Structure formats: structure tokens, C-alpha cells
Amino acid sequence: MTAVVRKGGEGYKMARYTGPTCRVCRRFGEKLMLKGEKCATPKCPVEKRNSPPGEHGQTRGRGRGRGRGGASDRGLQLREKQKLRFSYGVLERQFRRFFEEAKKRPGATGETLLVLLGRRLDNVVYCLGFADSRAQARQIVGHGHIMVNGRRAGIPSFLVKSGDVIKWCEASKKTEYYKRLAEEIEGKFMPSWLSLDKESMTGRVLNLPGKDDVEAKFSVKAVVEYYSR
């Protein structure tokens, strides 16, 4: 299916964005860590060319409105929604379902939305250090390499709960990727709501992520305002 891009580069009418991921970071003007380790090196395109992609990227700046000095409130809300959606690799329809679910639950909708996204199995696999990016984590889960509570889990959007145990399938431990990962896992950062036995490469959800456990670079207030109109 062909992507349909509106003026300004936002919006894609397709199942999933399949273009260069670094263009997404350049569009938003910040690193969304979509390429894993590359994002932390001087090779990151945001470091080399910190301007929007496209023919007029150097001159038009980011988020300029039509005939205005900057983006409209609606444009800024869309930007934050897209930034959050791209960061977690969620389709628009899926993202809207997560938002509607967050509205039904007690507490602030924006914070609940972040917690729901944080509970996705692909995000947990990423946070455990089993993958360098959420996109790679989705692939690992989708290919059936991960087990939750002793059962193979092949759905990236599966929501973990407190006490769940995440480990690799026995057959997957024979792969070269797993063997290399087991050697490199020692130096990886582990969030406080997760634990990892590095000897057996088994993770555990100690508790559900709170608002202080999710990335602070998203304006969830703008996302809530976007869907409230």
C-alpha cells in the first residue's frame, strides 16, 4: 500500500511506516531511539543534520504554520501524538484503542496511556535489554522467541502484569543473536519496575510502570487534548 503524505510530512495512510526511521527523528528534531545503538553515536543523522528532511528542510524549520510564525495548537497536539505513536511503533487504530482504554480507567488519562504503552510486551522486551530498539523487540516477539509465564507469546501488544516472568524459548537460546546478547547484557540499564536474572536471561515484572518510570519527553496533555476535540 502506498503512503499518502500531507503537506508538511505528517500522516501516513498505510499499515505501518516503512521508510527510513532516521527521517522520523529529524522530522521531530529529537532522538526517538528508533535505531537502537546508532542513535547514541555520532553517526546519528540528528547529530549530523539537525534539520527536517526534504528539499526545504533547512529553510522552513519545524512546525511552521501556514502564514503564521509557528505551528497552531492543533498542529502541536498532532506532533506530540505522532511522536508518542512512532516511539512505541503503534498503528493509529491501535493507538486510539489504547487511548480509549486509558479514558475508561481511573486516574489521569495521559499517565494511564503511558502506563498501558509501557506494559506492551515488545516494550518490556526492549526495556529488559533483549533488543536495541522497540522495532527489533517487536520482531523478536513476533517470531516467537519470547515466553511469558512458560507460554510462548507472539503478540507484541500483549499487556504484561505484575509478577509476569519473561524468558527466551529454549530453541531460541541456540541462535547466534542470543549468545551475543548474553555476553553483552551485563552493561545494559534496567528500569526499577523490572528485574533480570542475567545468568538465565529471565526477566520479571516487579510492578507496573508508574508515571516516573516512563520517558518524560512526551507531552501527554497535548495528546489528550488532541483526541478531546
Image: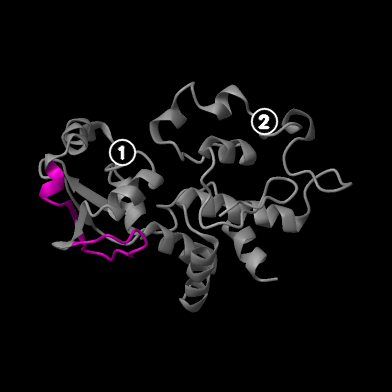
Q: Which residues are magenta?
A: 152-173
Instruction: Tell me: residue 91, above or below residue 50.
Output: below
Q: Nearer the viewer, residue 228 or 138?
A: 138
The amino acid pointed to by label 1 is: Phe
The amino acid pointed to by label 2 is: Ser
Classify mark 2: residues with Cα within 10 Å, few (<14), some (14-19) or many (20+): many
* Residue corresponding to mark 1: 189
Tell me what residue is drawn at x 35 percent, y 38 percent: 132
Q: Secondary structure at mark 2?
A: loop
Inter-mark Cα distance, 1 to 2: 30 Å
Image mark for residue 154: none
* Residue corresponding to mark 2: 51
Residue 108's spot in the image, x, y percent? 52, 69
User: Marks 1 and 2: which is nearer the front?
Assistant: 2
Residue 7's spot in the image, x, y percent? 75, 48
If you read the primary sequence from the N terminus, does the residue marked by circle 1 or circle 2 appear first? 2
Residue lying furthest bottom in this view? 104
Would you say 109 lies left or right of 175 here?
right
For the question of whether residue 141 can be seen, the reply is: yes
Q: Nearer the viewer, residue 115 or 42?
A: 42
Instruction: Tell me: residue 83, above or below residue 227.
Output: above
Would you say 10 lies left or right of 215 here?
right
Q: Which quadrant holds residue 163?
A: bottom left
Residue 64's spot in the image, x, y percent? 79, 43
